Amino acid sequence: MRDLVWLIRHTLKNTFSNKKNILLYFGTPLIGIIISLLAYGGSTAKDLHVGIVNRDPHYITNDTIHFIKGIEHISVTNVKESEIDDKITSGKLDCVLIFHSGFSQSVQEGHPSHIQIVSIRGAEITGFIKSYLYQYIDNITALSNIAKGDEHTFVEMYKRYQQAPFKMSVHPLQDTSKNKDMTYQTIGYLLMIMLLSAGNLAEIIIKEKENRTYFRLLSAPISAKKYVLSNVIVNMIVMTGQIIITLIMMDTVFHIKTNIPFWQITTILMLFALVAIGVALITVAFASSAASSGAMQNLLITPTCMLAGCFWPVDIMPAFVQKIADFLPQRWALDTLLKLQQGHHFGSLYLNMMILFSFALAFFLIAAYKFGRNNSVRNFL
């Protein structure tokens, strides 16, 4: 046990004696958070600037304008008809509503007309205005159809409609989709960084074989199994730090709410950490030098992260690519987190966790087998 502790301290000291490695291992995960904020953090609701030209000074028209002013995220300005082109083309107004003379009469007769929407931004703007405005006008038109041309009846129903004793209470709900997107993107980058970090730390095994440090260590009463186990523990220490720092920074500094209990998301990421270590040990076991190990990592990590959906949602990829993603551990880790965000109970996702653990176990067994048959320099196990 004392030898194992000494090996862990030896590896940590050699790794982090260079201060740049501290930034590399624990600062790089924050890049994923920044990228996510840049990708999804700027989509905030903006006010729509609407101009009004009223050429029909009637109570129905005035009430219609009052209704438009009451819509959230709409800023209404009265403009002159001669100013329309200038304000639209300059971008000061998104659209202009023109109520021509006869609008109120047409609504009262049950055939609304004499209204015009001017905009150069297309259906993006006009569709939003129409969805509110036309519904309001249709309600008044329905009153006209019921009155069947009787103006007195229409006026009485219209007054009751405007002064209805019941009111609609609106309670806005917080849009959590943006947080889900940012969480997905951040965790996707974190998975890639964990794979790269595990690979870099596992390369220490090859580098110490190349500079003969490994053999000097084995000349002491230290077995090869303890040496590799110490590297695995160092990997777990570093990746645990990456996970905790990333989750804390997401919540407290960048205010990205994962909507998943801390212990649940940590458990999933720790399982993936075992997978990352297994992948790293395989690259070391099959590599003949540190350079070839790095090349193998680049060939394995980046393409599989792309296919698994670490950089973008897997749903946007073709169906056959999605089927390939099901054979990648990154995909199962992300899928588990998505289901937790959707409200699935942690215990109901035991199959996902078993698959992640199976990936890790398979990688460890392959690496142990290859280490045991590696006679190029000296056996590890």
Image: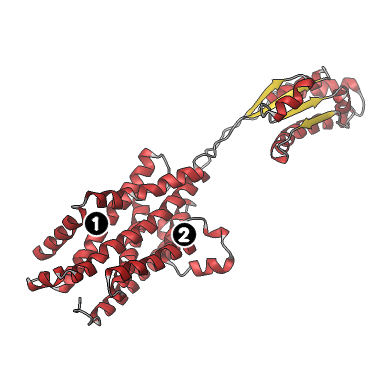
The colour scheme used here is secondary structure
| Amino acid at the residue labelled 1 | Ile
Say which residue label 1 marks.
Answer: 237
Mark 1: which secondary structure? Answer: helix
Residue 278 visible in the snapshot = no
Instruction: Confirm or deny contact between disc 2 and disc 1 (CB under 8 A).
Output: no
Give the CA separation, mark 2 to mark 1: 25 Å
Q: Which mark is residue 335?
A: 2
Q: Residue furthest left?
A: 220
* Residue shown at the point (41%, 65%) measured from the top left: 329
* Residue shown at the point (49%, 64%) measured from the top left: 307
Q: Earlier in the sequence, mark 2 or mark 1?
A: 1
Q: Which mark is residue 312?
A: none
Mark 2: which secondary structure? Answer: helix
Residue 270 visible in the snapshot = yes
Q: Nearer the viewer, mark 2 or mark 1?
A: 1
Left or right of 195 on screen, residue 4 = left
